[in-house]
Amino acid sequence: MAMTGLAHYETADARIEKIVVGPFENNVFILRSKRDGDAVIIDAANEHELLLEVSRRTGVRRVLTTHGHFDHIQAVTQMRDAGIDVGIAADDAKMLPSYDFVIPDDDVIEVGDLRLRTIHTPGHTPGSTCFLLEGHPVVFSGDTLFPGGPGNTTFENASFDTIIQSIDRRLFTLPPDTLVLPGHGLDTTIASESPHLDEWIARGW
């Protein structure tokens, strides 16, 4: 079972925990406002019993879904059954068994006194969405940006050209020191990845 309870990122006002779940080793992030205790989960990917336990411990009331691929949504139904609201971008909403609210582009989702800015980054899926923690050098990138390149675009309704455009225009405009927390694997930074855009375009993946 995944380890919980350790801070992946922490400041005076924000705490992020990371849990790795399921056969595809999905990253689940719990963002919590330390001032008032409100919290959200980024991607209810799998291991719903663990995620519900963490939700009770940390005060999670909502799930924000980066995109609708099956490995990122395995715990959605159980979370909703427990009274936790689930949101996703409109273009991916049909990929979920059920949901409670739609996440628009360039909107602000308040988590207590923290603010998450939504960034629509289509390409991996039509509705792929990243979440920028305003006032902090942190972006949750889902499966849009990883160490070493963009997410997989061999799926139906995916587009390499579109994901490259999303990364270039919506993510590489963020400050270089921005920490990138992807849907699988290790963290990276905008500064580490942005010099390699032309290499990715040349290789085609």
Image (cartoon, rainbow, N blue to C red):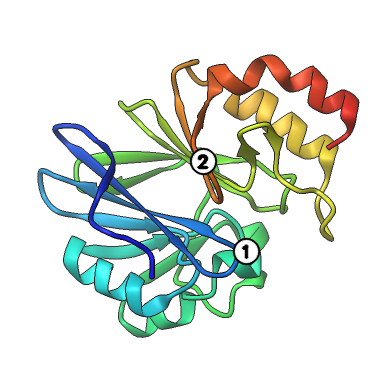
Residue 84 visible, this angle:
no
| Vertical side of 181 occupied by 18: above or below | below
Measuring from the top left, give residue 100's x and y in whole percent.
44, 71
Image side of residue 164 versus residue 135, left or right: right
Image side of residue 87 versus residue 171, left or right: left
Q: Quadrant of the C terminus?
A: top right
Measuring from the top left, give residue 93's x and y in whole percent.
61, 66
| Vertical side of 74 occupied by 156: above or below | above
Q: Secondary structure at mark 2?
A: loop
Image side of residue 176 versus residue 153, left or right: left
User: What type is the residue that disc 1 sits on?
Assistant: Gly
Q: Foreground residue, 150 or 122?
A: 150
Residue 111 visible, this angle:
yes
In the picture, the disc for residue 186 is 2
User: What type is the residue that disc 2 sits on?
Assistant: Leu
Instruction: Tell me which label, 2 or 1, sits earlier in the chain.
Output: 1
Image side of residue 84 versus residue 148, left or right: left
- Disc 2 from disc 1: Cα separation: 21 Å
Do callouts 2 and 1 mark residues in contact (Cβ within 8 Å)? no
Task: Please give the residue where the numbered disc 1 appears in the rendered image.
Answer: 68
Measuring from the top left, give residue 141's x and y in whole percent.
54, 41
In the picture, the disc for residue 147 is none
Measuring from the top left, give residue 126's x and y in whole percent.
72, 52
Instruction: Decide: few, some or many residues near mark 2? Use Cα within 10 Å; few <14, some 14-19, many ≥20.
Output: few
Task: Give the residue at x 49% y 36%.
Answer: 187
